[in-house]
Image (tube, rainbow, N blue to C red):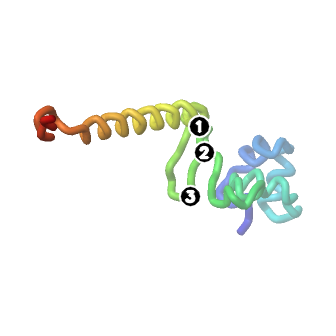
Amino acid sequence: MNACYGISGEEIARRCRVSIATARRWKRGDMRIPDTAAMILSSDLGQLDPAWCGWVLRDGKLISPEGCDATPGDVLSLRLLRSQLAAYQAEKRQLMAMDEQPQPGAIPAIVA
């Protein structure tokens, strides 16, 4: 598929930092689009690393193949979110351990 399909010449020129004339030549097929420009226009991060195939950068967001999106702030907050989750899980384990303690009078007293 043509990497320029559906993208205006002006947008191609802006993204690839080329003249509008060059972008239009690429769109018309008068000139072969360089691989690096095709990578930029595809926005597919799989071009950089196969593990990211299908992930794209669009409008300042990282978008998964399923369509979930994340802003740079969302990505930066992951460390905090993981820490909070670990703290909640530890607290839950503590509360569950306390619930497992026998209630007073549930165990008969040992008479010596």
Distance of label 2 from label 3 (alpha carbons) = 10 Å
User: Residue 42, how many percent across, how many down?
Assistant: 71, 56
Q: Residues within 10 Å of mark 2 (few under 14, many from 20)?
A: some
Q: Does residue 56 lie above or below 33 as drawn?
A: above
Which residue, as the protein is rendered here, is positioned at the far bottom?
A: 1
Q: Residues within 10 Å of mark 3 (few under 14, many from 20)?
A: few
Q: Does residue 42 lie above or below 20 as drawn?
A: below
Q: Does residue 93 lie above or below 46 as drawn?
A: above
Q: Quadrant of the N terminus?
A: bottom right
Which residue, as the protein is rendered here, is positioned at the far front?
A: 112
Which element carries disc 3, helix, strand or loop? loop
Most foreground residue, 2 or 69: 69
Give the residue type at disc 1. Val
In the displayed structure, does residue 11 sit left or right of residue 17?
A: left
Marks 2 & 3, CB-CB < 8 Å contact: no
User: Residue 25, how many percent across, how many down?
Assistant: 84, 57
Q: Nearer the viewer, mark 1 or mark 3?
A: 1
Q: Nearer the viewer, mark 1 or mark 2?
A: 1
Most foreground residue, 105 or 67: 105
Disc 1 target residue? 75
Which element carries disc 1, helix, strand or loop? helix
Disc 2 target residue? 62
Tell me where residue 112 sits by quadrant: top left
User: Residue 58, how many percent across, how many down?
Assistant: 62, 45
Which element carries disc 2, helix, strand or loop? strand
Disc 3 target residue? 65
Q: Does residue 98 lie above or below 64 as drawn?
A: above
Marks 1 & 2, CB-CB < 8 Å contact: yes
Q: Residues within 10 Å of mark 1 (few under 14, many from 20)?
A: few
Give the residue type at disc 3. Pro
Marks 1 & 3, CB-CB < 8 Å contact: no
